[in-house]
Image (cartoon, grey):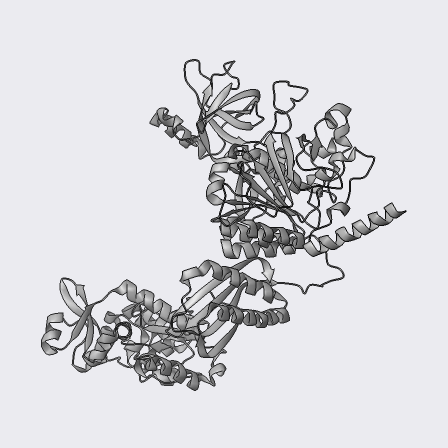
Amino acid sequence: MLHLPCWATDCLKRADPALAALRLPLALYEKQKGAMRLVELDERARLAGLYAGQSLSDARALCPALQVREINRPVLEAIFGDFADWHSYASPLVAVLTDEAAYGDLVLDITGVSHLFGGEQAMLEAVTGRLKNLGFAVSGAIADSIGAAWALAHFDPGRIASGDVREVLAPLPVSALRLGEDQIEGLTRLGLKRIGQLYGRNRQSLTARFGASLVLRLDQSLGHIEERLKPRLPPAEHFAERRFAEPIGLLDDVLMTAHDLALRLSHALEREGMGAQSFHLFLYRVDHKVMTLTVNAARATRDAGHIARLFAHRSERLGAEYDAGFGIDMIRLGASLLSPLAPAQIGAFETQDGTADLDRLYDRLASRLGGGAVTRIKFVNSHIPEQAARFESVIAKTPDDALALPDAARPRPLRLLPQPEPIEVAMAEVPDGPPQGMVWRRVYYRFVKAAGPERIAPEWWNAEAVPAATRRLDDGAHETRLETFDPGLTTRDYFLAENEAGQRFWLFREGFYAPNATPAWFLHGVFA
Amino acid sequence: MPGVRREQQLSQLRERIAGIEKRPPLASAPAVPQGERPGRYGALLNPPGGLLHEIYADQQRDGGAAFGFALGLARGLLSPARPAVLFLQLAHEGKEMGLPYGPGLKSFGFSPEQLIVARLANPVDLLWAVEEATACRAVAAVVAEMLGEPKALDFTASRRLSLRAASGGASVLLLRYGQGRAASAARLRWRISPASSQAPPFDTAAPGQPRWQVELEKGRLGPGLMQAGIGFLLDWTGDGFEPVGTAGTSGDGGLSRPAPSGAPPAVLGDRLSQAG
């Protein structure tokens, strides 16, 4: 647990070195109920006797040299989020604790990682020392529960409590339990100022007087009730990482490292007989920012070469977004969406159906072009031509609907226009028959052969279709039909028509034939 | 005797040149079984894989015909080991030309699950995707459509594609439109246009199966066959190409058509192949 009491002002000072060079008290104010009040203070301002909630004019009178800025909470919260992500260099599970403030409190789950730093004590010193070097005021503590660590970080920093924390927490004030203002006030009025004084009290009466949250917080701090943190980054079940003595900056170096990490990760996955579908590359920059690259595979894999290639393709799409800043000092490759992957026999008994090769190809294409660009044709159980087939990403396949398969005996065009295009037609010979010619995109086509009509009616059994159709009639929007196609659900009569050059078209008349009306005609597709 | 020796020497030299140029030796491409049909168009119905084709149509309005012809060529290359065909298209051009339509593929005779459609943002990405797809062992053919004369597709790019296709074994079919012919390293260049189809016997006023006017402008398919500059009419039977004049007259000529290279997958066994 890390607590950064002056994070907002420290962050401003880092962003604006001129401000830090002034070495004057700094405070942030906010307009509250019509008055300017201080909300964030740095160390110097605190020493000058200023406090949060003080009005700005009072503070200026007390401390004429005070530098003030207006607070921008959304920006601070966003920056703190990045700042928190960066801490995943120490542990993959990092969360921001927003019980007291939207920023300033960080929780790291260091289960099983502290030995990498040479023990808990050394890890705490390394993490806090690094922040102090960067100019942040920070206090940290390590405990078994989030509540206890929070209390220690705020009121007894530097402490490492393992096992039973009852004794450790007992002398701390009740405000170390993350309580509301009125709860603290009420407890203090009753003389319950230390956490230790709450031990052994009648829980029912405490709940009746101060609400259930008091008992809950107490239990959470003592570890009786488990409190879960919400990790900010996707939790990687398996990961490999590398730290650099000297920060690196070139994209090629990053990709080379990604390849090495992929090798290590694939060995780890192979030992467990697992493969993963999603890989995340975290680049930790020296100036506490993290870049994340994610690639997804169509099927679970643990092939290091393939994973590295996917990242290489993904990085080409990155372009100007890639910014190593002052350098990258750590890279981590994580894998998620794990599933069992049996060891494959290579060689003798390989089946040659090519699906594995194709999936790899789709991964490579999708990693550079984006998942939505590479698609397969998926049939939908519908009679409406434009709804009968849609494109579906090949790396996110859904099972096929056996009922949706089209009937090959019906004439359908090879190419369907995304929108039916309005055409002007020469009048049909017989009232309900095919037209003799059409003007499409300002060119006249005279038809010599035609087949049809094939009548396609709206799907009345589809509940959504009916209100749409009635609404359309109510609007009386019949005049505008020639300009744009309204996918409103009217009956269409489709014709296949061929001109003398052999070009074949799929066109339809919207609505039924009526003696005195001019029906609207549309071109919907072209045949081979 | 000296004639035979010369033939042998010639074929050895051809193979050496093919090896140097990384091209499959066309002369030794699997020929159509002799005797089953007049061999004149045999190689056309069964072109070997690993070639760069250019398919030119005079106008963009013939996009449907060009796409159908390319699919017909690609279909002959499908095999159980190479079960996929990719169609690549620029996203904004797709809006103008129309997008491949699944039920239409099915009624054309191309199994829709074997077609992967990729829509790309710019020609550079498109050429990259073509190369990437050609390198895949499971891809039978890549059909790429580009309108106009994109700068990215110069002679160097087409040479790259040609070499990639030769080493990968998948054919690349570039769909181009217009009268201009930019320099390219394509082995074969087709010029196609739709032709008035033969009406089906049951309805003389209705359009029949697709028919193309085809001309091989560049390249040669098979020994002594399909010389450049010869135009002919080609029908689509729903299961393969059929030169006009050989099928229509002999009644069941369409049935003695040679099998496409490799056995077609089971899903392809639609009504039309059953008819045979």
Q: Is residue A127 left or right of residue B249?
A: left
Please state the horizontal and vertical placement of residue B116, each as a whole percent of the image. 58, 46
Q: Residue furthest front?
A: B2
Please state the horizontal and vertical placement of residue A358, each as a whole percent of the image. 62, 53
Q: Nearer the viewer, residue A320 or A517?
A: A320
Residue B25 drawn above or below residue A230: above
Task: Name the residue rendered at 30%, 82% in the picture.
Answer: A155
Q: How many marks?
A: 0
Q: Is residue B87 left or right of residue A289?
A: right
Please state the horizontal and vertical placement of residue A419, each as a whole percent of the image. 46, 34
Task: Name the residue rendered at 73%, 59% in the picture.
Answer: A350
Q: Is residue B276 in view?
A: no
Q: Is residue A505 in view?
A: yes
Q: Nearer the viewer, residue B232 or B267?
A: B232
Quarter holding the C terminus of chain B?
Answer: top right
Task: Name the residue rendered at 37%, 81% in the picture.
Answer: A130
Q: Is residue A145 left or right of residue A344?
A: left
Q: Nearer the viewer, residue B191 or A485?
A: B191
Q: Is residue B38 left or right of residue B20?
A: right
Q: Quadrant of residue A175?
A: bottom left
Please state the horizontal and vertical placement of residue A327, each as a whole percent of the image. 41, 73
Q: Residue furthest left?
A: A61
Residue A498 drawn above or below residue B139: above
Residue A330 drawn above or below residue A75: below
Q: Nearer the viewer, residue B56 or A229?
A: B56
